[in-house]
Image: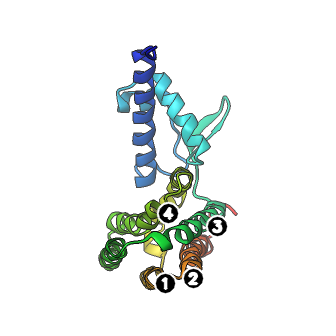
Amino acid sequence: MPVPGNAESIERTLLRDEAYVRIRDAILAGTLEPGERLRDAELTHWLGLSRTPVREALARLAEDGLVESEPQRYTRVTPLDRRDARDASRVVAALHALAASLAVPLLTRAELEAMRRANRAFEAALGARDVDAAIAADDAFHGVVVIASQNREITPALERLMPRLRRLERARFGSLGGRRSVEQHARIVALAGAGDAAGAAAASSENWLTLGALLEQTFDDDGGEET
């Protein structure tokens, strides 16, 4: 017996997902600034969508920690928060360490070379102070390991957490002095190439914890929004 089609339900899901992606990307880019009020009428006009998918998208973004609401008062972009840097980076570090421990025995020479290329692109982007290119290259570098891990639970967990770190990274990119990610990436590749799964996992964890610590430090440097 064929599964009955429900075109209306599918269309609603697609519209909700479209609203989610566009609002999320605007938050990550800083187009929608930390603390900015999000009003249904303005969002529906901007997106060209009805109120229902927009509200569903905002609820999902609230679950992701990118939007916060106070009933009958406001819905707004979540302000930048020191705790996001600390909490999200620790969980992300653990997930990437797990991915590395699973991936190292499976990594091919082509995948290791892809990681080296991504790291070279990352280094060039840092030198050019190109935040978009740096984040894309960093995602490409770590993405090789995540995919190679063949664990289907790691990717969705990271997709929920990474926007919170990437938003902070974009906002604080100019303040992230003393960054050692290029060298840390090279160490991950070297350990992975040597078949040292435990070492690569520890190095991957250190890489993300270093970013979290640097992000936290920026709150000290400017007085910080929240603790």
Q: Is residue 107 left or right of residue 156?
A: left
Earlier residue among tags 1 and 2? 1
Would you name the residue on which mark 2 appears? 199
What distance separates the C-alpha of mark 4 from that of mark 3? 19 Å
Would you name the residue on which mark 1 appears? 191
When the figure is inspected, residue 86 is found, relative to residue 186, above or below; the finding is above
The amino acid sitting under disc 1 is Leu
Earlier residue among tags 1 and 3? 3
Residue drawn at the location 43% of the way across and 16% of the way down: 2
Q: Is residue 46 left or right of residue 211?
A: left
| Residue 63: quarter of image | top right
Residue 179 visible = no
Asked whether the beta carbons under mark 1 and mark 2 sit within 8 Å of each other, the answer is yes
Earlier residue among tags 3 and 2? 3
Would you name the residue on which mark 4 appears? 149
Callout 2: SS: helix
Residue drawn at the location 60% of the way across and 48% of the way down: 65
What distance separates the C-alpha of mark 4 from that of mark 1? 16 Å
What distance separates the C-alpha of mark 4 from that of mark 2? 15 Å
Would you name the residue on which mark 3 appears? 90
Q: In the rendering, at what x and y percent does residue 131 appear?
A: 36, 67
The amino acid sitting under disc 2 is Gly
Earlier residue among tags 4 and 3? 3
Between circles 3 and 2, the one closer to the viewer is: 2
The image's colour scheme reads: rainbow
Callout 1: SS: helix
Asked whether the beta carbons under mark 4 and mark 1 sit within 8 Å of each other, the answer is no
| Residue 69: quarter of image | top right
Between circles 4 and 3, the one closer to the viewer is: 4
Q: In the rendering, at what x and y percent does residue 16 appear?
A: 45, 30
Please name whichever residue, 226 or 65, is drawn nearer the observer in this view of the structure: 65
Other-residue count near label 3 (Cα within 10 Å), few / some / many at <14 / 14–19 / ≥20:
some
